[in-house]
Image (cartoon, grey):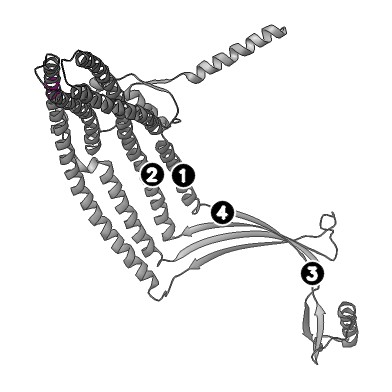
């Protein structure tokens, strides 16, 4: 490959990479929800919590399984300890004393002070190695059995938290998606209004120059034009924030380009479903109620754990070890002698008296369980009320949508009539301004009512605990 073809190939690669980088996400609302359920930060964190909970279950399980530990100890006595033995135990006392005195002279360069009738003696070697392997097995422990159940309950809590996170993520994506569509529609409407106002102002100036209207009429249109232009600039700035908020809900980088394939009108029509207002609600299936039930179960297990601490625990162990002794470090020599040992035992631990400490902890756990029962009943009542409110809000949003749709059509006709009257000299600029402001208000109310239908439907689905499709 020559130099020119190499440069051409490199440029093509750079261009293709740039095109790939600029590829935008094209998402319908359902596709955005599915995308978020895989990539949302909260969903990923909840999945990690489940994985951690599974490891916690196994960690707790291993407490009751055999445990094997090995140890190797090396000791070097910088100065060996001395023991005193009765002198009467030896026939030739003087020779022993001389040997010990010699030892002390070498070690301390002074005469040892030995109690009368005793002989100082040094036992063992200066160096030794001790290697051992110990097998332990828990035979019975009430705390372990309760802890094993609690770890499984903890896993269940993590799984329920993940389910709750998915429902919340769905609602967040719906709201963020709807906000972007509202912003886009607002920009389109304001640009249309601005274009009409610019033409009206231009025509009004020509009429004023010909002396057929007042300067105040032109100034009134300029005020209205300035207000609409300011609103348009503000919505354009918010548009970037709305897209960033959608990216955050999706779990993508906030500067990722997104193209929304659903329109606000189509989503509104899709989300008008009066049948959902009469759908059945089973509070026991709601994720919040199941979380509260699981919380109560965890408090019950905590009480049982405190009660189980009054039970005895039993464990068995088996130990095997080997030792070697030497005055010099030659433990790896083939002629080094090693001494074997082995031990089998059982350990029983019986709690007898704790100065009422265990009873106090058990009482606290009992109170926590009673509080969990109270919270469970509160959750039940709150969820029933939440469903009633969500149904009312959703029904109101549909009614407001229908009302605002009619009002928008009326406001458009009124504004059009006032505009015709103004340019024919039959009405004032103030009357035209009122009609225009009324139209702009109804336009925003109509757009907001469409978003409310979508958002309130999502809230009602969460209140009813409708599962993800």
- State the separation of the CA atoms marked 4 and 3: 32 Å
- State the separation of the CA atoms marked 3 and 1: 47 Å
Q: Find out whether the residues at labels 2 and 1 contact each other: C-beta distance under 8 Å.
A: yes
Q: Which residue is mark 3?
A: 77
The nearer-to-camera label among 2 and 3 is 2
Name the residue located 35 percent from the left edge and 30 percent from the top edge. 238
The nearer-to-camera label among 4 and 1 is 1
> Which residues lie in the magenta part?
405-411
**For this rendering, which residue is in front, 281 or 119?**
281
Image location of residue 23, percent across then percent down: 46, 18
- State the separation of the CA atoms marked 2 and 3: 54 Å
Question: Reading the chain from its start, which is encountered first: label 2 or label 4?
Answer: 4
Q: Which residue is mark 1?
A: 52
Quadrant assignment, res 405: top left
CA neighbours of label 4 inside 10 A, class few (<14), some (14 to 19), many (20+): few
Relative placement, left or right, of 404 versus 91 is: left
CA neighbours of label 2 inside 10 A, class few (<14), some (14 to 19), many (20+): many
**For this rendering, which residue is in front, 203 or 208?**
208
Q: Find out whether the residues at labels 4 and 1 contact each other: C-beta distance under 8 Å.
A: no
């Amino acid at each position: 490959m020559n130099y020119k073809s190499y440069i051409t190939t490199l440029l093509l690669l750079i261009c293709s990479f740039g095109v790939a980088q600029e590829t935008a996400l094209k998402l319908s609302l359902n596709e955005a929800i599915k995308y978020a359920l895989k990539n949302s930060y909260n969903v990923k964190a909840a999945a990690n919590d489940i994985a951690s909970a599974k490891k916690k279950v196994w960690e707790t399980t291993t407490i009751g399984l055999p445990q094997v530990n090995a140890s190797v100890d090396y000791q070097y006595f910088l100065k060996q300890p001395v023991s005193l033995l009765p002198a009467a135990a030896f026939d030739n006392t003087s020779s022993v004393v001389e040997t010990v005195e010699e030892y002390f002279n070498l070690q301390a360069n002074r005469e040892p002070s030995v109690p009368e009738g005793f002989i100082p003696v040094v036992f063992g070697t200066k160096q030794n190695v001790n290697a051992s392997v110990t097998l332990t097995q828990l035979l019975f422990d009430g705390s372990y059995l309760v802890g094993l159940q609690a770890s499984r309950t903890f896993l269940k809590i993590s799984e329920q938290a993940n389910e709750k996170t998915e429902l919340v993520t769905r609602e967040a994506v719906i709201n963020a998606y709807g906000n972007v569509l509202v912003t886009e529609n607002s920009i389109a409407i304001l640009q249309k209004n601005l274009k009409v106002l610019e033409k009206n102002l231009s025509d009004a100036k020509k009429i004023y120059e010909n002396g057929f209207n007042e300067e105040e009429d032109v100034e009134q249109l300029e005020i209205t034009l300035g207000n609409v232009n300011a609103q348009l600039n503000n919505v354009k700035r918010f548009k970037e924030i709305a897209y960033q908020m959608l990216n955050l809900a999706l779990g993508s980088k906030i500067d990722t380009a997104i193209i929304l394939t659903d329109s606000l009108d189509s989503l509104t029509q899709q989300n008008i479903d009066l049948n959902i207002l009469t759908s059945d609600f089973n509070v026991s299936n709601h994720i919040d109620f199941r979380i509260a039930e699981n919380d109560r179960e965890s408090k019950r297990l905590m009480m049982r754990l405190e009660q189980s601490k009054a039970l005895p625990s039993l464990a068995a162990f088996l130990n095997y070890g080997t030792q070697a002794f030497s005055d010099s470090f030659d433990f790896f020599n083939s002629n080094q002698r090693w001494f074997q040992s082995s031990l089998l035992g059982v350990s029983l631990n019986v709690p007898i008296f704790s100065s009422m400490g265990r009873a106090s902890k058990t009482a606290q756990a009992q109170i926590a369980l009673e509080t969990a029962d109270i919270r469970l009943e509160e959750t039940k009542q709150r969820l029933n009320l939440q469903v009633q409110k969500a149904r009312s809000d959703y029904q109101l949003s549909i009614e407001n949508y229908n009302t605002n749709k009619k009002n928008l059509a009326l406001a458009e006709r009124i504004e059009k009539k006032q505009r015709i009257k103004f340019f024919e000299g039959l009405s004032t600029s103030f009357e035209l301004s009122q009609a225009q402001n009324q139209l702009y208000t109804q336009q925003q109310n109509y757009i907001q009512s469409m978003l409310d239908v979508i958002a309130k439907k999502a809230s009602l689905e969460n209140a009813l605990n409708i599962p993800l499709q």
